[in-house]
Image (cartoon, grey):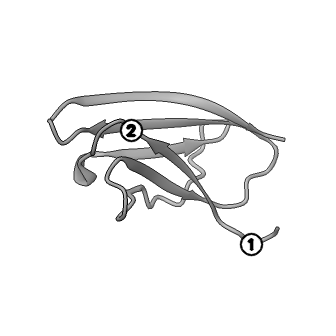
Amino acid sequence: MSGNVGSVSIWFDSDIEPLFSSIVVENSAGKRVDKGDSHVDPSNDSLLMVSVPPLPPGTYRVYWNVVARDTHRTEGDFTFTVK
């Protein structure tokens, strides 16, 4: 549906610190395509999410960086494809 905004969400196995956690989505050209509103879900402290507009077909890379409540820092990335 045109105009709908979706999200990319990542669940972690422990609560994360909102001020030190982020998620970014880029297209295959390396251009950031998310809405820049990365945040921890207010009702679930282990869910990190960011809004994305309707994405055209292609491959996207998600980069995430979090700090757990126990101060453990971790980061990673993964790809997904929109058909």
Query: Up-down: is 64 above or below 51?
Result: above
x and y percentages locating residue 36 in the rendered image:
46, 58
Q: Nearer the viewer, residue 82 or 42?
A: 42
Q: Residue at x 42, y 55 (%)?
A: 38
Query: Up-down: is 58 above or below 48?
Result: above
Whether tag 2 and tag 1 are in contact, CB under 8 A, the answer is: no
Task: Name the secondary structure under disc 1.
Answer: loop
Instruction: Mark 2 vs mark 1: give the one in front.
Output: 2
**From the viewer's perspective, is 39 left or right of 8?**
left
Q: Residue at x 35, y 65 (%)?
A: 42
Image quarter hosting the C terminus:
top right
- Residue where numbered disc 2 is placed: 12
**From the viewer's perspective, is 44 left or right of 57?**
left
- Residue where numbered disc 1 is placed: 3
Q: Amino acid at mark 2?
A: Phe
Q: Nearer the viewer, residue 77 or 31?
A: 77
